[in-house]
Structures are given as structure tokens and as C-alpha cells.
Image: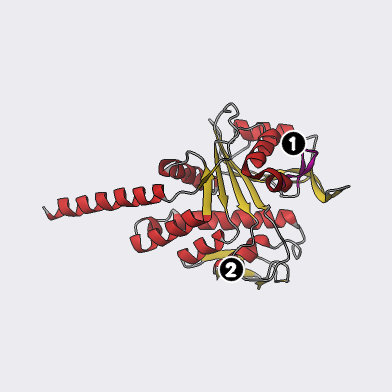
Amino acid sequence: MIAWVIIGALVLYWVAFLFWAQSNINSVEALSGAASTPGETYLIVGSDSREGWDHPDSTEGERTDTIMVLHKPESGPVALISIPRDSYVDIPGHDKNKINASFAWGGPQLLVETVEELTGLTVDGYFEIGFTGVGEIVDALGGVELCYDQDVSDKNSKMEWEAGCHVVDGDEALAFSRMRYADPLGDIGRTQRQQQLVAVVAQDILSPATILNPTKLIPVTAAGLDAFRVSEGTGVLDLGKFALALRSGMGGNAVTGTPPIKDLGYNVAGAGSTVLLDPDQIDEFWDKIANGEYEPGTEVGGIG
């Protein structure tokens, strides 16, 4: 009898939890309505909003600080590809420019259309996290461990770092993911640290220590729901499906990296210094991502 009472209480708890989570999902019109392509494709975006940021910053407006394409092919390894925000690309209805300009000009919908034109993949789900949201999730988790093998004192990102691995709070995690001026690899180095942060946060959220502990799961979920906005029509089950795909994208068998890059400092009148993706390799690259043709665990792209 006691066992049935406990089971019933657990069922009620999870029903209430799922109903609460569903009612607190923030959605935004983002998907293009283009014909589906094989597999599942998600666009993960970190918006560069300064609202709530504790440090002085002269940047105004909103841009994409992080752009990642998560693709689960019908067969083959899941891929998590970071697109440098300064990538010089075709933007539907506009002249070519940095890819983050599409977000500034047309919000999530134009960014989705731009990514679809670049990759040939139709985006099935859009997941955007606000600038301060990462920090709130990290704090709700009680901090996360990150690693970087160089000493850093960077006034732009406010990153102060001693080479090695450290448990960091939300503000430190944000600085870790934003720093590029003190990184010899610039934007590429930053995308590598962003992928590391996303991997660690996802791993901690999906761990039994979080999932099975209501006193931790609820504040972490609340922080995530406050921080994220997702494409219209996304429900709790869709979030779970995305989480599973993301966990695969963080595993050792995933394909990770960037598209092939020809020039990190490609100067364009009216756009400034941009990242030129390699025109001789880019189409083949995305075809192989779409079809799951890379070997599991391959790190792709980078400067050719």
C-alpha cells in the first residue's frame, strides 16, 4: 500500500512538473516553413543582449554571439557545428554580410533562412538563449568546471583565468564563452570554448544528480525556461527530444568543429573584418554533415 502511495505521489509530481514546464515555455516565430530535409536539424543561438549584464559595455542592440547547428542524420554520427558569427554569407533579401547581421536585421526568422541557405538543411527547431541566461543556468547548477590551458586577463570579456581547470560561477562562465581578443585563434577559439560550456552544462542538466533531485531540477528548469525562447509549437516532449540529440552531439562519437575557413580576416567594404568560409569546400562539407558521412568523433573545419 505504501509503495502505491509513493508511486502515485511521484506520478502526480511529474505530471505537475511537466504541466508547469509546458506553461512556461517562451516561444518565438522562427521557422521558415521550408520543405523538410532528411534527419533532424536544430539551430542553437546565443543572443548578445546586454540586458541585466553587470559590467560596463558600450555595445547596443542584439546580435548572435553563438550560432550552432545540431544535426542528427538518418544514419551516421550526430554533428554539432559552430558557425563563426562574423562568417561572410548570403543573406536572403539583402547583400552579403556577416551572418549575425541577419539576426540584427530580421530576427530569428531571417537567421534561420540564412542558415538554411548556407547549409542546405531545413531547421526543425530553434533554441535561443539570452546573454545572461547561460550564467543563470550555471548558477542554478551550483557552478560548472571548465578548462583552458592559458593565463588570460581580458578587459573586453572580463575573463580572468589561470591556466587549468576551474569550477566557475555564471559570470565567469559568460566571460569564458565570450573571450576572443586575448585568444590566438580569435573567433575560432571562442567557438571551441562555447562548445565546451554547452557540453558541460548539458551534461550536468541531464545527469541523475539533477534529474532525480527536485530541489535542484526545479530551479535549473526555471532558469532554463526564463533564459530560453524556442520556435513556435515546441512542447516539453520536443525539448526532451532536443536534449537527447544535444547529448549525442556532446558525446565522443559526435562530429564537432566549424565549417572550413579560408580567411579569418577577410576585409569587406561596409562589413569590416569578416570570416571567409572556403568556397571550394563548403558545399561538400554540409553535404557530408547532412548525410552523416564523417567518421564518428571527427573534428572538422577550421582554417584550411
In front of the other: 129 or 248: 129
**Is residue 293 at least partly visible in the picture?**
no
Relative image position of residue 162 (x, y in whole percent):
65, 73
Q: Amino acid at mark 1?
A: Ile
- Span of residues in magenta: 87-99
Query: In front here: 88 or 162?
Result: 88
Q: Is residue 193 above or below residue 121?
A: below
Residue 98 on the magenta segment: yes
Real-space Cα separation, disc 2 to disc 1, in angstroms: 35 Å
Return the residue at label 1. 282
Q: Residue at x 63, y 53 (%)?
A: 47
Q: Mark 2 packing: few (<14 Cα in 10 Å), some, or many (20+)?
A: some
**Circle 2 SS class:** helix
In the picture, the quarter occupied by the C terminus is top right
Hey, what amino acid is under mark 2?
Asp
Quadrant for residue 280, please give it.
top right
Q: Which residue is mark 2?
A: 171
Q: Is residue 60 magenta?
A: no
Q: Secondary structure at mark 1?
A: helix
